[in-house]
Amino acid sequence: MLKTAIYPGTFDPLTNGHSDLVRRALKVFDCVVLGIAASPNKQAVFDLQQRVDLAKAVFSDRPEVEVSGFSGLLVDFAKQKNAVVILRGLRAVSDFEYEFQLASMNRQLDSELESFFLTPADEYSFISSSLVREVAFLGGDVTPFVHPIVAEALANKSKL
C-alpha cells in the first residue's frame, strides 16, 4: 500500500523551504500531495489557480508529488487523497504551539490521521512566504529563496 502524506498550506508563494520539506518527505512517503488551501480569509498575492500552477511547474520533475488546490476541512481533503499523514514544517519553537493545536484538532476530527513534523534544512530555516513576498515587493532579490519560476512570477506581480 502506498503511503501518502498531505502537505497543506497556502504556499503564497512556494519557497525553497517548502520544496526542501517535500523532497525530504519523499524519503519517508511514497507520495506527497501538496494541498494548496484556498484560504479566502487571507490576502493572497497569487490566486489559487496561480499557486497550483506554480507548484506544478516547480515539481514537474517529481511524479510522486501531486499538487491540488482545496477548500474546506483538511481532514476531508486528506480522506479524498487517501493520505495517512499530515506533513508540517517547524522552523522555530514559535511554530510549535500553533502546529500542536492544529495537530490536536485534526486528531479530534479524524483519529486515523497522524501529523508528521519536519524541520527545514539550516539554509531555509528563516524563510517564510510572507518575508519573501515583502522582499519581492520592496524590489529585493528573492532568487535565493524560491524556484526561478516563482521568482519570475513574483517579479511580474511586483511590477503591477
Image (spheres, helix red, strand yellow):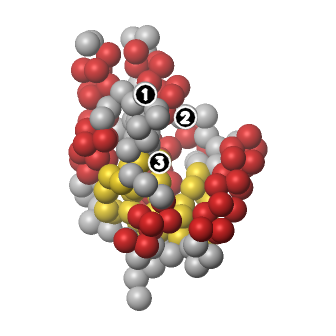
**Quadrant of the drawing holding the N terminus:** bottom left
Q: Mark 2 and mark 3: span between their CA atoms?
A: 15 Å
Say which amino acid is labelled 3: Gly
Say which amino acid is labelled 2: Ile
Name the front one of labels 2 and 3.
3
Q: Position of residue 60 (x, y in %)?
A: 24, 55
**Quadrant of the drawing holding the C terminus:** top left
- Residue name at image x 45 percent, y 79 percent: 3
- Residue name at image x 40 percent, y 82 percent: 2
- Residue name at image x 31 percent, y 41 percent: 48
Residue identifier under label 3: 9
Label disc, if present, on residue 43 of the rendered structure: 1
Q: Secondary structure at mark 1?
A: loop
Q: Secondary structure at mark 2?
A: loop
Is 83 in front, or is 74?
74
The reply to whether callout 2 and callout 1 are in contact (CB within 8 Å) is: no
Q: Is residue 75 left or right of residue 60?
A: right
Label disc, if present, on residue 127 of the rendered structure: 2
